[in-house]
Amino acid sequence: MPNDPRRLLDAVDRTILEALSADARIPNTQLAALAGVAQSTCLARVRALRESGVLTGFHAEVDLAALGRPLQALVAVRLAVHNREQIEDFTAHVRALAGVLSVFHLAGQTDYLVWIAAESAQGLREFVVDHLATDPAVAHAETSLIYEHSRGPGIWGALDPA
């Protein structure tokens, strides 16, 4: 596609995106220095990346245990029927539930993976029973507890290879 913004990214844009991916709170002065451009140019580049849809947001890592939700799980969901309306309704319903961190719509035997943070094993059980297992749209739900979650380097790899 000739107007695809990803095709127009240069080395400065990639450097900015890499640095923001590692630390979205990096000051513009440092970001500009890393990219080798003036601060005003850096601000304009970040603005352009947001406006083009390449940069979609800035996010904070939150300690879920500190918020009273130390238990995390992935629930694999298979729908009973696969029509567009049911898929859209289920997606909207699950995304709106408290405790849902992410919803992944998949190809294959599993239709969805729902990442959940719960206050306890009982709270997780109640969530799954109340919102997933008893939902008429759901044919099957299987819960896997998450022992540990850590981020990978993303598409950029490690900023500091040392």
Image: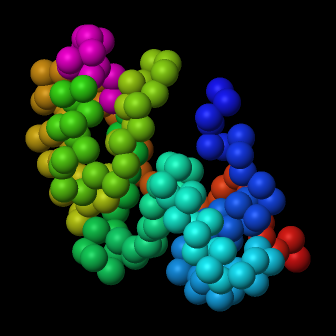
Quadrant where the N terminus is found in the figure: top right
Magenta segment: does it hold 143? Answer: no
Looking at the image, residue 20 sits to the left or right of residue 93; the answer is right
Decide if residue 160 is in sight here: yes
Q: Residue at x 73, y 59 (%)?
A: 14
Quarter containing the C terminus: bottom right
How far from the left and from the top, in percent, is residue 57? 45, 61
Viewer-proximal residue, 35 or 114? Answer: 35
At 71% from the left and 81% from the top, the residue drawn is: 38
* Image position of 89 (left or right of 19): left
Q: Which residues are magenta?
A: 77-87
Snapshot quadrant of residue 160: bottom right
At x 53% / y 80%, what residue is drawn?
25
| Horizontal relation, residue 56 to residue 26: left or right | left
> Is residue 149 shown to the viewer in this render?
no
58 on left or right of 14: left
Which residue is painted at 25% across and 44% down in the image?
95
x%, y% of residue 33?
75, 84
Instruction: List x then y, in percent, for residue 43.
Output: 58, 74
The scheme the figure's colours follow is rainbow
Residue 54 to residue 91: above or below: below
What is the number of callouts on the image? Answer: 0
Residue 82 highlighted magenta (yes or no): yes
Residue lying furthest right:
162
Figure quadrant of residue 34: bottom right
Determine the image quadrant of residue 111. Answer: top left
Residue 142, position in %: x, y? 35, 34
